[in-house]
Image (cartoon, rainbow, N blue to C red):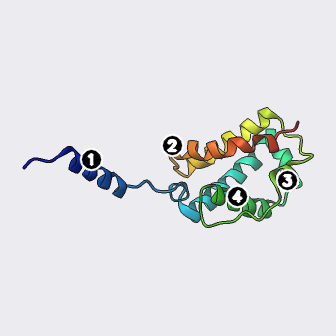
Amino acid sequence: MRVTSFKFALLITLLTGCASQPSLYEQLGRQQGIDAIVGRFIYNLESEPRVSRYFERTNLNRFYEKFGEHMCEMANGPCIYTGDSLLQVHNGMNITEQDFNLLVELLMDAMDQENVSQVTQNQLVKLLVPMRPDVIYQ
């Protein structure tokens, strides 16, 4: 039996279409996974003296809820972020570039602790990078 190149291309298209990748939300473990990542991230923040001072006056329960909403929404999950803008939240905190980079490392550590793949971590960090100017003190 001879398969024409058109039929072969159609077959490949159908097969690759069926093998769709899970969404970032699913890769992060859906809401349960995001909640676990955010919980570990907050623990990491509190344990790191170089950045814990930024969170001394923070309502950590609210931070947990809003950061989880934000992460869920960024990952195209079913959540809607209902908090203040990042610029409003970070205004007056005077977060340095060095400390921002440490915060990203602590988030990645939290994802490592929750066995999130490096590829998935990179996808999330890529979404966070454009928000950097709203967090760092100018």
Determine the image quadrant of residue 123: top right
Q: Secondary structure at mark 4?
A: helix
* Mark found first going from the N terminus, 2 or 4: 4
Viewer-proximal residue among 77 and 102 = 77
Say whether residue 135 is visible. Answer: no
Q: Amino acid at mark 3?
A: Val
Q: Nearer the viewer, residue 18 or 33?
A: 18
Residue type at numbered disc 1: Ala
Q: Dot 4 corresponds to which residue?
A: 70
Residue 75 showing in the rendered view? yes
Cβ atoms at labels 3 and 4 below 8 Å apart: no
Task: Kindly identify the amino acid type of the residue bearing the numbered disc 2.
Answer: Val
CB atoms at circles 1 and 4 under 8 Å apart? no
Are there few (<14), some (14-19), or many (20+) residues within 10 Å of tag 4? some
Q: Quadrant of residue 17?
A: bottom left
**Label 3, label 2: how far apart the Cα atoms are:** 29 Å
- In 3D space, how far apart are the residues under numbered discs 1 and 3 (Cα atoms)? 51 Å
Residue ID for mark 2: 119
Residue 137 relative to residue 64: left or right: right
Residue shown at 52% from the left, 42% from the top = 118
Q: Residue at 27% of width from left, 47% of height from top? A: 9
Residue where numbered disc 1 is placed? 9
**Could you give the CA–CA distance between mark 3 and mark 4, rounded to whole angstroms?**
13 Å
User: How far apart are the two marked residues, 2 and 4, measured between alpha carbons?
Assistant: 20 Å
Residue 33 shown left or right of residue 106 in the figure? left
- Which is in the foreground here, disc 1 or disc 2? 1
Which x, y percent locates residue 124? Answer: 60, 47
